[in-house]
Image (cartoon, rainbow, N blue to C red):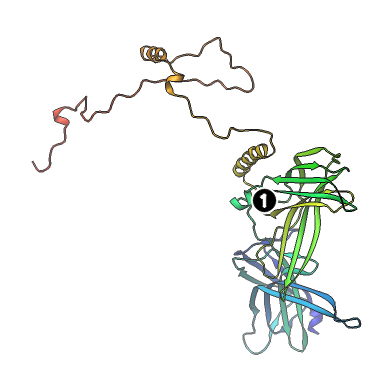
Amino acid sequence: MLFDKVKAFAVQLDGATAGAEPVFSGGQVVAGRVLLEMAGAARVGTLKLRARGRAHVHWTESRSAGSSTAYTQSYSERVEVVSHRATLLTPDTGETTTLPAGCHEFPFSFQLPLTLVTSFEGKHGSVRYCIKATLHRPWVPARRTRKVFTVIEPVDINTPALLAPQAGAREKVARSWYYNRGLVSLSAKIDRKGYTPGEVIPVFAEIDNGCKRPVLPRAAVVQTQTFMARGAQKQKRSVVASVAGEPVAPGRRALWQGRALRIPPVGPSILHCRVLHVGYSLKVCVDIPGTSKLLLELPLVIGTVPLHPFGSRSSSVGSHASFLLDWGLAALPERPEAPPEYSEVVTEEEVAATLQSPFPLLPDPRLSLEGPYFTCIQEFRFQPPPLYSEEDPNPPPEAMRPRCMTC
């Protein structure tokens, strides 16, 4: 039988190395080969190729319609994002062709759409991309093989929206047996909204404990998977990273000056899919004994393109100055002072001495600017420019003057 003569049947992608498969994004070309190894000559029909990518969600919910009636409601939705078909082998005459023994390669290539969804595997849904090859043969069941490939859509965090600082404040009255035990307040801020896996989030927070019991502040990065089908939603949350602070005693205030929270290797955010979303947030909470937690949530976007060095420097400098101002670690005047007048800085005697001397004024040798916080700046004072005049004080000679072309 022909089934026994097929020794190997597989799909191989170009660019694959030992233990590593290529990763694609929207607009790229997927190329590869279908490998077919025959133990002997045999007749075959057609060899067809199909590439598809789909986002699929599915879950069930149990509902009750009375004391003795219960039913299960099913929710399902799918979206096709890639669909490509091709025929790699077609008989020239008749319905079959004969392939000799040995290895045969059938190349293929196709271009992905410009906009795709990142590959994802969740509890109630997934985004999968695969290439399936089918070998049709006479009088024998078709032989099939498939190859799964990964798509990661780039998410660039170097945008104004993702470089903007995120901040918030919450407060809660601690209650115990219907008695007020004091007010607990929380304010937190991060320098930007977008991060990439492996980066450290510096968390700035202020916890004011006005109750009579110690409270415990904590921070965590939470992933939220949202699945949508038939107008309903299903969510799943999980903590991917967390950090805990020291307990805050009653009547005391604690300040986090950039508490480090590292992002582990997680998938990027998925924000533009019709059936599922993957989002992240930074949750800063305060555990209050005897009452519910005080929770503050700041949005995050996990990207794939890291922060540029120039953007990192400007963002860090600006955010650092903003942090200092917001947390009361520095103060600036409400209105900047006007610069001094020229006459207040330079006297008439210094101007006269400058005009008479061909060299600039030297600083007083008795003044010392040595130290790690000062930089010696050499001042230069030049003579003022002459007054403007419409007549040229040095006219060119008669021979060099331009003549009228009509004369």
**In which image quadrant can residue 244 be found?**
top right
Where residue 23 sits: x, y (%)? Answer: 69, 61
Residue 10 in view (yes/no): no
For image coordinates 65% across by 52% down, the residue present is 305
Q: Nearer the viewer, residue 42 or 254?
A: 254
Image quadrant where residue 154 sits: bottom right
Q: Residue sitting at 76 percent across and 58 percent down?
A: 223
Residues 289 and 245: in front is 289
Badge 1 crowding class, 10 Å Cα cut-off, few under 14, some 14 to 19, many 20 or more, is: many
Residue 381 image position (x, y, % from top left): 42, 20
Along the line of sight, which residue is nearer the eye, 369 or 148? 369
Q: Residue furthest front?
A: 179
- Give the x, y percent position of residue 175: 86, 51
Above or below residue 258? Residue 28 is below
Q: Is residue 68 toward the left or the right of residue 299 in the image?
A: right
Q: Quadrant of the N terminus?
A: bottom right
User: Can you give x and y, in whole percent of width and height, for residue 294 in the image?
Assistant: 80, 51
Q: Is residue 216 visible?
A: yes
- Residue 344 in the figure: left or right of residue 194: left
Q: Which residue is mark 1?
A: 193
Looking at numbered disc 1 in the image, what kind of residue is underneath it?
Lys
Which residue is more in the foreground, 176 or 332?
A: 176
